[in-house]
């Protein structure tokens, strides 16, 4: 059996450490994935293992006791995690994105001294909860009116300022980690004094999962990613103290415009799924996947070899583009860099499903049974291009329009 190869190279010291740690747990995560998928069960055991190795603090800065992974380090870690279990990586991204938005992204803004001091105090408490208490943050962003998550309208979930904090009210759906997270990092609109909502007044607030007025509802019996437990959430006049603000007021909106790569952090989940589909297909055709027919004629078939080559080429294209755009992730990227990030999101998400389709086709009918990983990867991979704020269609729209029009042109 070929050795498990790294998805990327060269890896820096942090990336090497994170990848090795995930790979040591990976086969067990993959094994658990079958039951989690069948029962729609959240991968809590995987989270317990990640916490044992402190990997839940993978991108919390070292000065707060975290492992200090950069955005790129986190991406490499996340792709390796997804290679072994997509649902763990996708849900973990919500937590990791919250850590990143409140640290490196906020740090790129020139804040007034008072706002900076306040944010510093807030985030120190957040990271303390993560590092010392194992707290996990979900990130419910999507709402039934999807225009908000797509950036076209203010979020319907409202945060009304009161003495010492906010009163949060509204509904979120697709809240991955529902029922497992300790906090929901809720993106909401701070009402102005006239009760009006403006997209510029978006705030990110950590609502404790056990706060009065937080209610989970609905089910999560879905096509793919059945273990993410992405049920819906209702907030009925939930009081949240001021110190739970995860980004200073106004910064979320500015970051969405000026730091667009912040929304790429889900792509490694689907790169890992793509890699897993490729790894599985090779193992299956070599007769090395558990339960697979013994290697024989199929491996020698030119048609199958061509399909495996197509899978590998798509995978390499996804990985190369992702590697490039992750090195370009920063404040105020150029137009070329921003459009390349959309192109990457589109490519990774679409390729993930195409690679899985090819995998099923080349492995053949016997591989569609649920004891084979490719069956689940195929379903899980379908969801990537649906992810807001950068769905496949939104990426296409932006790449097309902005290639033809400069700002201000009609
Ligand atoms: C497994 C999973 C986990 C998730 N976890 C989270 C989470 O933790 N937090 C969170 O906030 N959200 C999460 N989401 C939600 C996700 O980001 C989206 O918000 C959700 O999938 C949008 O669903 P919708 O029906 O409201 O989509 P809509 O916005 O209504 O769009 C439906 C589809 O139509 C497409 N479309 C739009 N215009 C056109 C057009 N002109 N032509 C063709 N197609 C078009 C869109 O691009 C999209 O693919 C998760 C989703 C999934 C599948």
Image: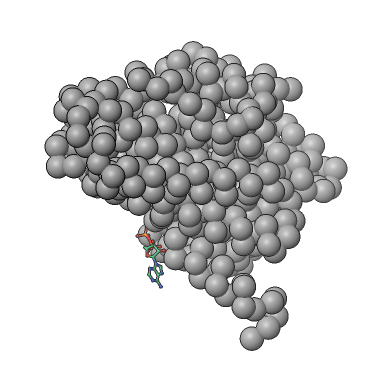
Query: Looking at the image, is 267 positioned above or below residue 47?
Result: below
Q: Can you name the residue that lies furthest to the right here?
A: 113
User: Residue drawn at (82%, 42%), measured in percent from left and top?
Assistant: 114
Judged left or right of residue 248, residue 31 is: left
What residue appears at the point 60 percent right and 31 percent down from the top-left corner? 9
Q: How was the colour assigned to the protein in this rendering?
A: one colour
Quadrant field for ligand 1: bottom left
Q: Position of residue 188 (x, y in %)?
A: 54, 53
- Residue at 30 percent of width and 35 percent of height: 281
User: How many numbered badges does the structure rendering display?
Assistant: 0
Q: Is residue 256 left or right of residue 146?
A: right
Examine the rendered structure and indicate whether residue 308 appears above or below residue 24: below
Q: Residue furthest bottom?
A: 410
The image position of residue 53, as x and y in percent, is: 52, 14
Residue 217 visible: no
Q: Is residue 62 visible?
A: yes
Above or below: residue 53 compared with residue 282: above
Q: Of 285 and 160, which appears nearest the observer?
A: 285
Q: Residue 153: x percent and y percent?
A: 53, 67
Instruction: From the top left corner, tell me how far across and down residue 342 is, in percent.
Output: 56, 58
Picture layout, residue 126 above or below residue 1: below
For the residue pair 396 and 246, the one nearer the viewer reads as: 396
Foreground residue, 220 or 300? 300
Q: Residue at x 42, y 17 (%)?
A: 25
Q: Quadrant of the N terminus?
A: top left
**Left or right: where does residue 370 sit relative to residue 29?**
left
Picture quarter with the C terminus: bottom right
């Amino acid at each position: 059996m070929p050795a498990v190869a790294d998805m990327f190279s060269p890896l820096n010291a942090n990336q090497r450490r994170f990848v090795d740690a995930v790979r040591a747990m990976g086969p067990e995560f993959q094994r658990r994935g079958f039951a989690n998928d069948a029962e729609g069960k959240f991968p809590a055991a995987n989270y317990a293992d990640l916490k044992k190795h402190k990997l839940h603090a993978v991108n919390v800065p070292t000065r707060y006791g975290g492992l200090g992974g950069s955005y790129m380090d986190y991406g490499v870690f996340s792709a390796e995690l997804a290679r072994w279990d997509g649902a763990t990586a996708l849900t973990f991204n919500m937590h990791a994105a919250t850590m990143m938005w409140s640290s490196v992204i906020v740090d790129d803004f020139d804040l007034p001294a008072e706002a900076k001091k306040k944010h510093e105090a807030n985030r120190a408490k957040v990271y303390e909860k993560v590092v010392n208490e194992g707290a996990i943050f979900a990130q419910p962003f999507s709402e039934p009116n999807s225009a908000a998550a797509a950036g076209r309208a203010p979020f319907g979930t409202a945060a009304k300022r009161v003495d010492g904090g906010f009163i949060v009210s509204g509904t979120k759906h697709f809240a991955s980690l529902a029922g497992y997270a300790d906090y929901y990092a809720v993106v909401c609109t701070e009402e102005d004094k006239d009760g009006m909502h403006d997209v510029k007044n978006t705030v990110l607030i950590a609502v404790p999962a056990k706060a009065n007025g937080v209610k989970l509802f609905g089910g999560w019996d879905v096509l793919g990613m059945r273990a993410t437990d992405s049920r819906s959430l209702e907030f009925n006049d939930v009081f949240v103290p001021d110190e739970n603000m995860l980004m200073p007021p106004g910064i979320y909106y500015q970051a969405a415009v000026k730091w667009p790569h912040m929304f790429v952090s889900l792509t490694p989940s689907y790169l890992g799924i793509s890699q897993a589909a490729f790894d599985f297909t090779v193992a299956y055709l070599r007769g090395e996947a558990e339960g697979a027919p013994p290697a024989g004629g199929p491996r020698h078939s030119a048609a199958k070899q061509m399909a495996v080559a197509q899978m590998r080429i798509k995978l390499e294209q996804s990985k190369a583009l992702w590697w490039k755009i992750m090195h370009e992730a920063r404040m105020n990227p150029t137009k070329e860099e921003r459009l390349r990030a959309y192109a990457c999101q589109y490519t990774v998400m679409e390729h993930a499903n195409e690679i899985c389709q090819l995998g099923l086709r080349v492995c053949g009918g016997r591989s569609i049974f649920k004891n084979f990983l490719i069956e689940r990867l195929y379903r899980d991979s379908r969801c990537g291009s649906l992810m807001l704020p950068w769905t496949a269609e939104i990426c296409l729209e932006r790449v097309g329009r902005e290639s033809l029009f400069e700002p201000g042109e009609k």
